[in-house]
Image (cartoon, grey):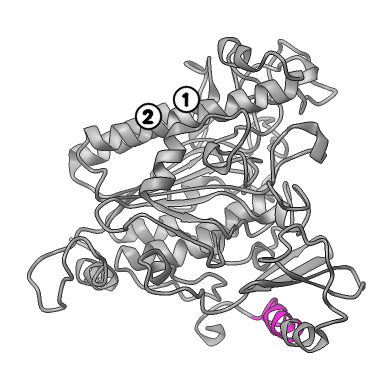
Amino acid sequence: MLPARHSTPLLAAALWLGSCTTPSPVAPSSAVAVPPPNVVLLMTDDQGWADLGFRGHPRLKTPNLDEMARRGVRLDRFYAASPVCSPTRASVLTGRHPERMGIGGANSGHLPAQEHTLAEELRAAGYTTGHFGKWHLGTMTTEVKDSNRGRPGATQHFSPPWEHGFDACFSTEAKVPTLDPMVTPPREHGGVARDLVPGGPYGTAYWTGPGERVTEGLEGDDSALIMDRALDFMGAAAAEGRPFLAVVWLHAPHLPVVADPDRARRFADLPLQQRHFLACLEAVDDNVGRLRQRLRELGVADDTLVWFTSDNGPEGQPDSGLGSTGPFTGRKRSLREGGVRVPGIVEWPARLAPAVTSVVAGTVDTLPTVLSAAGLPLPEATLDGVDLGPVLRGESADRGRGMGFRHKGAEAWTRGRWKIHRKGDRPFTLHDLEADPGEEHDLASQRPGLVTELQRELAAWSATFGVPSGPEAR
């Protein structure tokens, strides 16, 4: 039996779905129960907006993601909450801008215990929950040296997934090599610290629970190793007839980027890191295909919401070949479009018709959208995200409010086709993203009234930072 505060998820889910073209609308008085969806949240690490076959990439083949985009809802203006990884991950699980939680950058802060996470909310409603892959929202141990911040006796940032609502884990604190993840690759693959010896231990472990470090079965493609565990978890949940949340956060294609030699050989004419970068992304696509096939085999594909995105734009300089932002300026660590506009695809076969939308949406919208789809109330917290249900169902062409960004002294605000941006105390620039996706032409002097209007919206949003979270702040 479901807990009392979540006593009507099936009816609420029916209402969320009532305007879908398939199946027929369900009236509130209907006896037909609409099951809450299973949820799979897929995230890559440092994949650019245009690192996909359907974006016209000249070399990359991603047939499974291409099919998912054709059959699902393609979100062409989907944004990471931050241009770096840890903050974006926090936004997915909480629906809140990461700076509200003190997570301003990678290896900065941790997910606080008082935050209401998506996993906690769904678990309270009867879901089984699992996290697989890169966590990067706190350390995993206080007993041994591990990854970036795990140390004996270091408790300040200890915040593992099992303390935030996850029943099952196969999780690392931070990055690992994308092939043979426990082994340090040659330095030319990037991301290898000076104190690491190629061929020796990489120093970051997979953990499945308190003090439970994985020591076997960690050879081969890292994306496949993560997906293996996630698919086992989904299979067990389906066998029990329980709805599941699977958060699958892949390390690929983050440095150190290493691919299977046979796969990398297809790109032999390219420089080494670029060769392995593209091969890693094709491995990601293969594993997305494995996921979608397994959901069909389990008989749950129609009732599973799968959401694919990346945590931020690509690493390196534009001429590095490590990721494509398409027409956009900026990359990882920048609030320009290339740093925060990322792939966005939502597939829910039984409930969402294929569509393409340019409505502004982002990772902060994940929690409210999923909870609404499951028929559950939102947590008592100041949320920056909105329920994208009307957009996904094709009922609305407007998010309903603008979206703000803050990172390392830079700030931006986007609403509709317009965006303002500045670093530090510099004047705001204004860009028409429909006419000028590359943000090359500053229109601030031509539209001072619009700049003032958007600046006021940004200021009003920024003023809510530091306000206590809870019913009084809603």
Among numbered discs 1 and 2, the one appearing first in the sequence: 1
Instruction: Tell whether position 464 is magenta.
Output: yes
* Residue 314 visible to an observer of this rendering: yes
The residue furthest right is: 426
Q: Residues within 10 Å of mark 1 (few under 14, many from 20)?
A: many
Residue pointed to by mark 1: 224
Asked if disc 1 and disc 2 are in contact, CB closer than 8 Å, the reply is yes
Name which residue lies at 28% across and 37% down. Answer: 295
Residue 309 drawn above or below residue 320: below
Residue pointed to by mark 2: 290
Q: Amino acid at mark 2?
A: Arg
Q: Which residues are magenta?
A: 455-467
Q: How many marks?
A: 2
Residue 25 at x, y = what percent? 18, 70
The mark closer to the camera, 1 or 2, is: 2
Q: Please give left or right for residue 317 compared with residue 90 in the image.
A: right
Residue 183 placement: quadrant: top right
* Residue 213 visible to an observer of this rendering: no
Pick whichever, 227 or 236, lies toward us: 227
Residue 34 at x, y = what percent? 18, 62
Name which residue lies at 74% across and 18% down. Answer: 272
Q: Main secondary structure of the magenta part?
A: helix
Residue 73 drawn above or below residue 31: above
Pick whichever, 193 or 109, lies toward us: 193
Residue 418 at x, y = what percent? 69, 73
Instruction: Tell whether position 36 is magenta.
Output: no
Q: Amino acid at mark 1?
A: Ala
Residue 102: which disc?
none
Is the N terminus in the top left, top right, bottom left or bottom right quadrant? bottom left
Q: CA distance from mark 1 to mark 2?
A: 9 Å
Name which residue lies at 40% across and 40% down. Answer: 67
- Secondary structure under the numbered disc 1 in the rendered image: helix
